Image (spheres, rainbow, N blue to C red):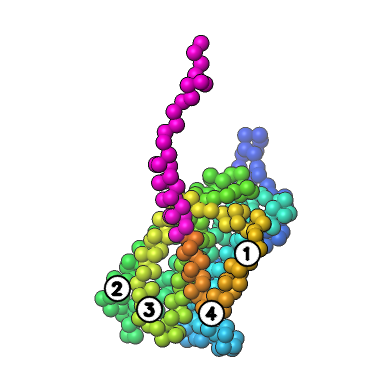
Amino acid sequence: MSLEQRLPEGDDAPRRRIDAVALLPSAATLGNLLGGVIAILFCLLSIRGLFGDVPLREFGPRLSELFPSYLAVGAYLLLLSMLFDALDGRLARLARRTTEFGGQLDSIADIVSFGAAPVVLFLTVLLHRTVLPGGEAGPVGQIEWRLGLIGALVYVSCAAIRLARYNVENVRGESGQKKFSGLPVPAAAAGMASVLILHEDLIHSELLAWAGTIRMALGPLLLCLGLLMVSRFDYVHVFNVYVRRDQPPSHLIVIVVFFAMAWWWAQILLVALAYTYIISGLVLNIVGNKRAERLPERKPDESSIDLN
């Protein structure tokens, strides 16, 4: 018996049907989803011994520095997914087609690209670096793997909770929204992807000691990012607050500095941008709480008291 045959008919069982969807916003959301899926595919290529971490020299020397391994390509794909994620909302408002379907599709894409894919990338790094050539992990590798697995499971669980909470608490859409409650899932994924990109760059630059230090911090970092996602710290909506409004001409120097740093060391720039935003939420909430504590309690105005 099919599902339609089992459902009762009549006014007590209304059926909801999607007649049409906005093409461009939905296509951007699917681009977000496919970016995460292909990032996971590059993790599989990296794990496979035959294709493991082959330098991509055919793109030229400069691009080979940016994409030294399959893991680096996968991490960059997550940043590309972030671009699609930012575009779908803008396109939906331009087309005046912000729908519940688009919101649900966006959350499904986000849990893959910004929840599962960063975790798979991280676990792939651990598999590469903690397992000995003989196929068995040493004592340090076993501890690092177990701690990393705990952080990964907490992260992906918190990402799912954060997205579900966002869907429930933001039923009116994000038009006019100035802040988020909790670290946005794309920002958490950017924090993880940027560190992974830097790790791969250090590995292929023969700075193994620095790369090892970063790798050992990845598990606790995942745990912290997961907890920030489900926290109640307020994070500014960068696009709605800063990008849309007019800026003074002096702010053009920021763009010049941005491109200069991108040319000098793009990996460091990505880490700096991601963690400036992540830390900003903590700083702004601490400053806001201290200001609230310093404000004196407001006494009732005696002139406004009704004596009758």
Mark 4 touches mark 1? (CB < 8 Å):
no
On the picture, is 49 further left or further right than 83? Answer: left
Q: Does residue 141 show up?
A: yes
Assess disc 4: are there few (<14), some (14-19) or many (≥20) residues with their C-alpha within 10 Å of its C-alpha. Answer: few
Instruction: Specify which label sits upstream in the sequence, 4 or 2.
Output: 2
Q: Tell me if residue 291 comes above or below residue 269 in the rendering.
A: above
Of tags 4 and 3, the one toward the viewer is 4
Q: Residue under circle 2?
A: 142
**Residue type of the residue flagged with mark 3:** Trp
Spatial CA distance of label 1 from label 3 is: 37 Å
Q: Position of residue 6 (x, y in %)?
A: 59, 44
**Residue type of the residue flagged with mark 1:** Ser
Instruction: Specify which label sits upstream in the sequence, 1 or 3.
Output: 3
Instruction: Specify which label sits upstream in the sequence, 3 or 2.
Output: 2
Q: Which mark is residue 264?
A: 4
Spatial CA distance of label 4 from label 1 is: 22 Å
Mark 4 touches mark 3? (CB < 8 Å):
no
Assess disc 3: are there few (<14), some (14-19) or many (≥20) residues with their C-alpha within 10 Å of its C-alpha. Answer: few
Q: Residue at x 49, y 13 (%)?
A: 307
Q: Tell me if residue 52 comes above or below residue 77 in the rendering.
A: below
Q: Which SS class for mark 4?
A: helix
Q: Residue under circle 1?
A: 250
Q: Is residue 97 magenta?
A: no
Q: Residue at x 55, y 85 (%)?
A: 64
**Residue type of the residue flagged with mark 2:** Gln
The region drawn magenta spans 279-308
Spatial CA distance of label 1 from label 2 is: 52 Å
Q: Residue under circle 3?
A: 210
